[in-house]
Image (cartoon, rainbow, N blue to C red):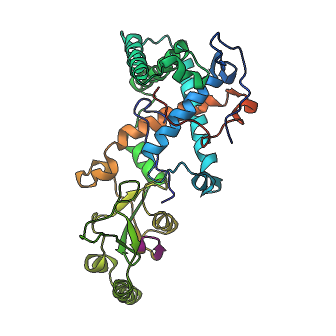
Amino acid sequence: MRTLKRILRAAVPVLLAALCAALLSCSGGNGTAYLRDPVMTYRGKSITEGEFRLYLARYKYQFGVTYSDFSDTQEFYNSKIGYRTAEERLFEEVVTNVSRLLVADYMFSSGGFTLPAGTGEEINAALDERDSFLRAEGSSLEKDISKYGLTRDEVYELMLRDEKVFPVYRNLDSTGRLKTDDAYLQSYLEQNYVRFMHIYINNAYEYETDDAGYHVYDSSGNWKTVPMNAADKAAKDTVISEIDGLLGAGTDFHEVYEKYSEDRLYDRGYYLTKNSDFIKEVIDCAFGLEPGSWNKVESEYGTSYVMRLEMDEKPWEDASLSDFFKTYPEDRKKNRFTDILDSQASGIEYDHDILDRYTVQASNKESNY
């Protein structure tokens, strides 16, 4: 499903072509080219080319962990997500998140905030541990980070920058700037979510099994699917014809749902955004409907009849809907935080000549920093 569902990186909860061979700036005594030219600058703070290279690798790794449809292949990077390629979409996400870190770094300094005691020691301990691991493998921390054009001290400062986000967030929250009352939460819900139910019939695929009847797994560890056999598909198509007739004759949608749908997990409907990890054709259909109307949708997963429902009042308080709203109020605070950071990002100066040398596809994805 080409949705690129966003899951915020735990270490920074708000954020949320080949690499150029011509390395700029000065070189160290060991031959390492240190990439210290700024790629973005904001009120005396900057992100160097080396730091951006490391951030790019970090986010590429995270994309593979958190986006269900990410694939480190040319086909994926060239594929379209809306009007952009996956490469363009992901690279923009990296630039946006690094820009937010830069603004937060400035807000931390200008606000006179401090990090908890021991933060620096914890970062150094983590770097020491990484160095010990690498030396046991015949390498070293210095050698490992040289591919980013950085020194240990520069990686240390980068990791400190990550930590500075937290006190800035807590300060804005404590001063009420991230306030999310019921009116705000309901308004956000109605602007960004759709509530729908769908009658789902799988007439598209079945799970492959081996000679012993066990499921076969694909390279991602999921059960492998194959096209549905002709006999089963014919039976499913007969059911679909019955549903067509019933709904066409005005039979109650929920009644047909109860009798026929193969997905009855949520009797009160789904609550999803346009970026939710679900069948894209179903979500697009739901957003295009008026409440109370329905339409039939075909996808690679089968056939769905989608009816848009009126939005409930404060569904995030309903325990039966917790699958959709587990962290909804807190996530809206994070939205407000990123909105504040983004509102300042217009003041950032970017060196596009340097940024244009990089792509997500070409970056290293083994970042451990």
Give coordinates of residue 149: x percent, y percent.
62, 21
Q: Which of 241 and 358 is in front in this view?
A: 358
Which secondary structure dominates the residues rendered in magenta?
A: strand
Q: Is residue 122 left or right of residue 340?
A: left
Name the residue located 23 percent from the left edge and 51 percent from the top edge: 319
Q: Which of 312 and 303 is in front in this view?
A: 303
Name the residue located 44 percent from the left edge and 52 percent from the top edge: 68
Q: Quadrant of residue 244?
A: bottom left
Give coordinates of residue 352: x percent, y percent.
73, 33
Does any portion of residue 314 appear in the rendered image?
no
Q: Is residue 285 above or below residue 161?
A: below
Q: Is residue 360 above or below residue 189?
A: above
Q: In this view, does 150 lie to the left or right of 332?
A: right
- Residue 11 painted magenta: no
Q: In which quarter of the image is residue 10?
A: top left
Span shown in magenta: 296-302
Name the residue located 72 percent from the left edge and 17 percent from the top edge: 25
Name the residue located 41 percent from the left edge and 56 percent from the top edge: 272
Q: Which of 263 and 125 is in front in this view?
A: 125
Q: Which of 75 and 335 is in front in this view?
A: 75
